Amino acid sequence: MEFDPNSLKYDSNGLVPVIAQEAATGEVLMMAWMNAQAVTRTLESGRVTYWSRSRQAFWIKGESSGHVQELVELRFDCDSDCLLALVRQTGPACHTNRRSCFYRAVRSGQVVEIMSPIVD
Amino acid sequence: MEFDPNSLKYDSNGLVPVIAQEAATGEVLMMAWMNAQAVTRTLESGRVTYWSRSRQAFWIKGESSGHVQELVELRFDCDSDCLLALVRQTGPACHTNRRSCFYRAVRSGQVVEIMSPIVD
C-alpha cells in the first residue's frame, strides 16, 4: 500500500509528534512535531524537517547549526498519530549542545543531570 | 534539586507526551500521555500510569492485559515538555499484540509491516 502523509491522524493544530531515535545506537534524541507537508518533505529530501510551533515555519533540523538528521527510516504507530524517525544525527541533537534532549533523570525524587554538553 | 511534577510544561489539556522505551534493548515501544498526577503515581508506584484521553481516566498500563511496564527511570527533555520512560515491558506493548506500536515503516513510498503480532 502506498504511504499517504494525509492518512496520518493530526491534532487540532494539524501536527503529529515525532520521536527521533539514533538508528545506530537506539538512543532517543528528541521529540518534535510535523505537519503533513513536513512529513512529505522529510521523505522526499531524506533530511528530517519538522514544523516549528514557536516560529510557525518549517524547520530543517540542523540547517543553521549543521547538526542535521539524515533519515534512515520513518515508522508510524498503531493509531497513526505518532511517528518514529530513525536517523543518523550529526553532532548534538539538543540546542543545549547535548547529544539528546533527555539529559535529566528523576532518581530518588531528585533531578539528576546524566549527560554533559559536547565540547567542540 | 527535588523533582516537582508540576514543574513540567503541560499542554492546554494538562498533558505531556511520554515515550516508553525498553530499557534493556532501547526499542521504542509506544507514546502516550500523562498529567501531573499520572507522573506522580508512576514515580510512587513504579508502574507506568498514563492518562487515557479516550477514556478520560488513569490508565495503569497492563492492568487488564497483564502487559505491565515497570519503571526503570523517568527522564525529561530540555523544554520540560516531553518525558522518556525507560521501562521493563512484560509482553507486547501494543494493543495489536505487537511488541512495539511502531510496527509499520515507509519504504520506497510503500507501507511495510516490519513486526508481527506475538503468538501466545
Image (cartoon, coloured by chain):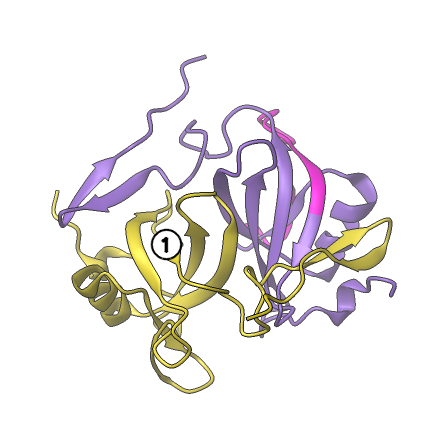
Chain colours: A yellow, B purple
Q: Residue B60 sits in which quadrant? A: top right
Please name the residue shown 45% across and 66% down the image. A32
- At label 1, which amino acid type do we have? Arg
| Chain letter for the residue marked with disc 1 in the picture | A
Most extreme residue toward the top is B120
Q: Is residue A93 left or right of residue A43?
A: right
Q: Is residue A53 left or right of residue A71?
A: right
Which residue position is annotated with label 1?
A: A88
Give coordinates of residue A13: x percent, y percent: 39, 75
Q: Residue B11 sits in which quadrant? A: bottom right
Q: Is residue B51 left or right of residue B26?
A: right
Along the viewing direction, whichever of B85 and A104 lies nearer the viewer: A104
Q: Is residue B64 above or below residue B75?
A: above
> What's the magenta region?
B55-73
| Quadrant assignment for the C terminus of chain B | top left
Give coordinates of residue B79: x percent, y percent: 61, 72
Please name the residue shown 44% across and 35% down the image. B100
Most extreme residue toward the bottom is A55
Asked whether B63 falls inside the magenta stretch, the response is yes
Q: Is residue A80 above or below residue A101?
A: above
| Quadrant assignment for the N terminus of chain B | bottom right
